[in-house]
Amino acid sequence: MTRRVQYEELCEILARIFESVGTPHDIALLLAENCASCERDGAKSHGIFRMKGYVDSIRSGWVNPAATPRIEDVAPSFLRVDARNGFAQPALAAARSLAIGKARKTGACILTIRQSHHLSALWPDIEPFAEAGLIALSVVNSMAVTVPYGAKRPLLGTNPIAFAAPAEGRAPFVFDMATSAWAHGDIQIARREGRPLPEGIGVDADGEPTRDPARVLDGGALLPFGGHKGSALSMMIELLGAALTGGQFSTEVDWSGYPGAATPLTGQFILLIDPALSGGNPFAVRASEFMTNLSAAGLHVLPGERRRRNRAENLKNGIVLTDEEWEQLMTLAPIPGENANAILER
Amino acid sequence: MTRRVQYEELCEILARIFESVGTPHDIALLLAENCASCERDGAKSHGIFRMKGYVDSIRSGWVNPAATPRIEDVAPSFLRVDARNGFAQPALAAARSLAIGKARKTGACILTIRQSHHLSALWPDIEPFAEAGLIALSVVNSMAVTVPYGAKRPLLGTNPIAFAAPAEGRAPFVFDMATSAWAHGDIQIARREGRPLPEGIGVDADGEPTRDPARVLDGGALLPFGGHKGSALSMMIELLGAALTGGQFSTEVDWSGYPGAATPLTGQFILLIDPALSGGNPFAVRASEFMTNLSAAGLHVLPGERRRRNRAENLKNGIVLTDEEWEQLMTLAPIPGENANAILER
C-alpha cells in the first residue's frame, strides 16, 4: 500500500523531526527541504531513507546541528567556511550570497567548506547557482568505503561530483554522480529489497568480488566506476574535498565513539564561474544548442531531466510513499502518527 | 631494430619539421618540446606518431602555425585567449604568467582558449602549474567521434580531462585521461599493430559494437568510459571547452575542405587554484600524506608516476624508437636521413 504526501507537508514533518533532536528551526527547515527535495525528485537514495542517519548522528553527539558556520573571506575569489562540526548545507547557505557576488565580480569563486557533515545529494547545492546564471561544480569526500583501482583496501569515499550550467529557455544541465560504481545509499536500498548487485560494483571483506549487497556493506567495499579513470577522479575529489578545504580525508573519519553516526565529517569544494564573461555567443544559448543536439542524437533524457520530470509530477500529485516508508518515518517523528496524519489532512 | 635518440636531439628534429612547413622558430620549438615530451614519457599516442597529423594540418592550410594569440584580460579571475586558428600550446604559453599572477592574487583563475588546435596530451599543459605550486584542471573538446551513452550517433569528442596538484617532497599528482573509453591515438596504434580492441570501446558505422579498430576509425565511433557517468563528464567538457571558451563544439569541427587535417579546432578550459589559501595544514603536505596512504593501500603506481619513471629512464638512456618509427619521422624531415643522423651523432 502507498500514500501520497504533498512536498510542503513532507518538509514540515521532516523539519519537526530535525527540531525534535535539537536542530534550530531555520536549520531544521533547510535540511528538511533538502531531504524532501531528494524524495520529491525521485533521488530516493538521498530522500527520507536517510532520516534515520541524520537523527542517529545528531543523537550520538557526532554532529552539532546548532553549529554556527564561520565564514573566512580570504581573497577576491576564494571563500572558506568552517562548518564547525555542523551540516554542510547551512554552511553553504551562509556563504552563498557572498560567493555569488565574488563570482560575478571576478569571474570565478572557490568556496571551500570544512568540518562539515554532508549526507545528501549534491545537486540541491548547485542547481540553484545554475538557476542564478552561474556554472557550478562541486565535489565532496565521504568515508573510506571504496578501493582505489589497483589497490587492496578502501581509501576513498563514494566521492560524488556534480556539475550544473544554465541553458537558455530550458532547465539547467545538471548531473550528480558518485565516483564509486554505485552510491552507498543505493547499495543499502538493494540490501533492504533483497536485490543482488550487478558485477563490478563491490568486494567483500576479503577483497573478493561479490554481488551480495550485505557482504559489501558489512566489512566489504565498493569499487570505483570506470576502473582507473573513476579511481583517479575520486582521488582528485579527496584532494579538493579534504586537502584544499582543510577538512578530513575519507580515511580520517572516525565515528567509532558515536554509535549510530552516519554523516561523514569531511569537506566540500564548490567552484562558481560567471559565464557572462565567456567569449563568443552567450553561454546559455550555446548550452541550449548543445542540449538540443543531444536530443536530436537520440538521447531521450538529458542530465537532470528525470529529476525535473519527477518534480513536476510529484508537486502536482504528491510524493508516493509506501506504508513501510511512512511507518519508518513515523518511528522518528516527535508527533504521534495520527497527528502527523492530521498535518497531511490539513 | 631500434635506436635510442636523446630528448634534446628529438626536439631539434621535430622543431626542424615544424619549421619546414612554415612554423616560426619559437612556436616550432614549443610544439617540438611538447611532442618530444610525450614520446619521452611513454605517452606514445601523443608522441612522434602525431607528427604526420601536425604536418598535414599545417600543409592543408587548416591551422595557421604562425598565428599570434590575442589575450583578453576580462576580469580579475578570468582570462580569455583567442588562438586565432593557431595551436593551443603557444596560446597557453602567451597567457601563462598573467594567469598565474591572477590565481596568486585572487585565489583562482579561469583561462579559456578558443579557436585553438590541440592534438597533444593535456598533462604537459598543467604539470608545470603544479610544479609552480598551483592546482590545475584542464579539459579540451575535440571532434565528434564518441556516442553519448544512450544516444545513437557521435556528438562528443574524446574530450580529455586532466588534473595536477603539488605534493610536498615528491612529484605532483597528475592524471590525464580521455572521457572516451580509449584515446583516439590508442585506437590508431591498435589498427597499425593489428590488435583487436577489448569489448565496450567502440561501435561500427551502423552503431553496432565492434572490436576491430579499423571499423571504429572508418565511420564508426568510440563509446564513453564508465557508461552514463563518463558520458556526462564528456558533456561537461563540451560545455566548458566550447560554450564557455567561445570555441566550437566537437560536432562543429568541419575540416572537410582541408585534406589531411587532423587537429581539432575547438577550445580549452583551464582552472587554476592557489592552494596557499586552503584552510588547515598546507595543501601540498596533505596531498603528500594522501599519496603515501595510496601507496600503503597497495597502489604501486600513483597517477603521473609511470610518466615520471619513463622520463627519468629516457632522459638517461635516450628514447627508444623503432626503425619504422624513425623512417616515418624521416619522411617528414626537411633534412635527408644522413643529416638527421648527423644531428644524432653530434
Image (tube, coloured by chain):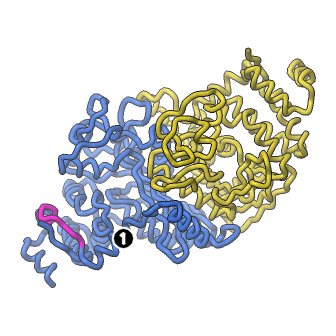
Chain colours: A blue, B yellow
Please tell me which residue lies in front, B74 or B2: B2
When the figure is inspected, residue A269 is found, relative to residue A157, above or below; the finding is: below
Residue A106, image x, y percentages: 63, 68
Relative to B265, A229 lies left or right: left
Q: Quadrant of residue B75?
A: bottom right
Instruction: Determine which residue is flagged by label 1.
Output: A309
Chain letter behind tag 1: A
Quadrant placement of the N terminus of chain B: top right
Q: Which residues are magenta?
A: A319-327
Query: Which residue reaches farthest front?
Result: B206
- Kindly identify the amino acid type of the residue bearing the numbered disc 1: Arg
- Element type at mark 1: helix
Residue at (16, 64) in percent of width and height: A322
Residue A75, image x, y percentages: 59, 62
Q: Is residue A321 magenta?
A: yes
Please tell me which residue lies in front, B262 or A123: B262
Residue at (74, 51) in percent of width and height: B117
Q: Is residue A290 magenta?
A: no
Q: Quadrant of residue A177?
A: bottom left
Quadrant placement of the C terminus of chain B: top right
Whether residue A73 is visible here, answered yes or no, is no
When the figure is inspected, residue B290 is found, relative to residue A72, above or below; the finding is: above
Relative to A66, A242 lies left or right: right
Residue at (27, 43) in percent of width and height: A197
Residue B215, image x, y percentages: 59, 39
Residue B77, image x, y percentages: 65, 63
Crowding at mark 1 (Cα within 10 Å: few <14, some 14-19, many 20+): some
